[in-house]
Image: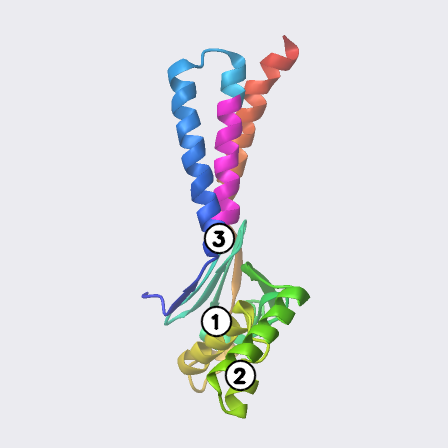
Amino acid sequence: MTPLLTIRSTPARVGAWAWMAFAALNLIDIALRGRDTASAVMAALLLLGCGIAYVLGLRPAVVADEGGFTVRNPLRDVRVPWRAAKKVEATDALTFRFRAADGEERKVKAWVLTTSPRAQARAERRAARDARDARLPQQHAARLKGRTPVTYAAQRLNEIADRQRPKGGTLTETGEGGVINWSVSAVAALAVPAALVIAAAVPAVLA
């Protein structure tokens, strides 16, 4: 399905790709010149760092499409059809309330966007300054007050949910509900390099 909205963290992705480039250059150097156990351990550590960069920097996202929304956190994926979606709230992170496939109400926080009281205060000051400089009407200024990336993302997701949520019907009738699964690729991205680190380091410790 074509995404209607995709939310990612640009700083996290830039940092992750920067590490990937650093690791790639060092792995090339090790491949050309490394012939000892220390080189093998370093190569495994670099691969583990790539796994961490993928899990923490590249994977996290919130994707809304015509069928529902997907929350990709570092190690788990949450897929919720619009019929099962309750509300998106802006707290210290995007918080999704939904009905799970077992009928229970659940909530999950997205890793991709977070905020803090300090960021909230900065957003309020910035919104007040922008409203004053632009001479916005009072109702528009009030709407901008306190807006942070988290609150703005929650507003957009709730608007999409209101448009896409089917009219009529119940979860009992359709059997639809949110599903939480472990991400095989994320777990493998950490487990495989970690195993290589152990395998490369043990001979050096026992020597």
Identify the mark nearer the N-term, 3 or 1: 3
Cα–Cα gap, marks 2 and 1:
47 Å
Residue 99 point in image, percent of width and height = 56, 72
Identify the mark nearer the N-term, 3 or 2: 3
The residue nearer to you, when weighing 162 against 24, is 24
Q: Residue at x 46, y 59 (%)?
A: 8
Range of magenta residues: 42-58
Q: Colour mode?
A: rainbow
Q: Residues within 10 Å of mark 2 (few under 14, many from 20)?
A: few
What's the amino acid at mark 3? Answer: Pro
What's the amino acid at mark 1? Answer: Glu
Q: Secondary structure at mark 1?
A: loop
Residue 105 point in image, percent of width and height = 62, 72
Is 122 placed above or below 134 here?
A: above
Depth check, mark 3 against mark 2: the one in front is 2
Viewer can see residue 31: yes
Disc 2: which residue = 132
Disc 3: which residue = 11
Is 181 placed above or below 34 here?
A: below
The residue nearer to you, when weighing 137 against 23, is 137
- Quadrant showing the N terminus: bottom left
Q: Is residue 197 magenta?
A: no
The residue nearer to you, when weighing 135 against 140, is 135
Q: Residue at x 45, y 55 (%)?
A: 10
Residue at the extreme top: 207
Viewer can see residue 59: no
Mark 3 vs 2: CB contact within 8 A: no
Mark 3 vs 1: CB contact within 8 A: no
Disc 1: which residue = 176
Residue 77 point in image, percent of width and height = 50, 56
